[in-house]
Image (cartoon, rainbow, N blue to C red):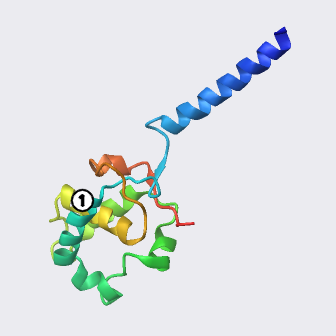
Amino acid sequence: MNVRALAIVCVVALAVAAVASAQNSPDAEATVRDGVYSAEQAKRGRTTYDTKCASCHDGGTMGPELWGDQFLAQWDTKLVGAFFSRIQTTMPEDAPGTLGENDILDVVAYVLQTNGFPAGDKAIPNASALTAMKFVRKE
């Protein structure tokens, strides 16, 4: 192999390695399309949602619906961590700040499931896992 061909092979190998590293890096930005919650977590979230959230958010009588085009348009490209924080500091309306972190994570998982985003093998482990995760509309 001549020097020019060897240089090209090296450059291509480095580029492939850089792309693979960026995709597998913990700093790579996750999206709600990446299977970031588990089905079991969403199931628990539905229970919490039904008891703490549904009276206001089902049908949008007091709070907005947490699914569908309008919800996704409002949150598109925003961080899931911001959604978590909004729930944590303002919900439920009659007792803000009373939901525990795990309850909120479960509700977030349920909201993702309700909006048609796929479940994965692992639950969302903690709130900090949401700080670099974005909402993106379904294709």
Residue at position x 44%, y 75% from top?
71
Residue at far front of view:
1
How far across and down, in percent of the image, does residue 104 sit?
A: 24, 62
Q: Is residue 6 above or below residue 138?
A: above
15 vs 29, nearest the viewer: 15
Left or right of residue 62: residue 115: right
Left or right of residue 84: residue 103: left
Residue at far top of view:
2
SS class of the residue under badge 1? helix
Total marks in image: 1
Residue at position x 32%, y 82% from top?
63
How far across and down, in percent of the image, does residue 83 sit?
A: 36, 63
Q: Is residue 59 above or below residue 9?
A: below
Within 10 angstroms of label 1, few (less than 14), some, or many (20 or more) residues? some
Left or right of residue 125: residue 36: right
105 vs 98, nearest the viewer: 105
39 vs 109, nearest the viewer: 39
Left or right of residue 77: residue 64: left
How far across and down, in percent of the image, does residue 89 sit?
A: 25, 64
Residue at position x 30%, y 48% from top?
122
Q: Quadrant of the C terminus?
A: bottom right
Residue holding disc 1: 40
102 vs 12, nearest the viewer: 12
Residue at position x 26%, y 69% from top?
90
The quadrant in which residue 94 appears is bottom left
How far across and down, in percent of the image, does residue 21 sit?
A: 54, 31
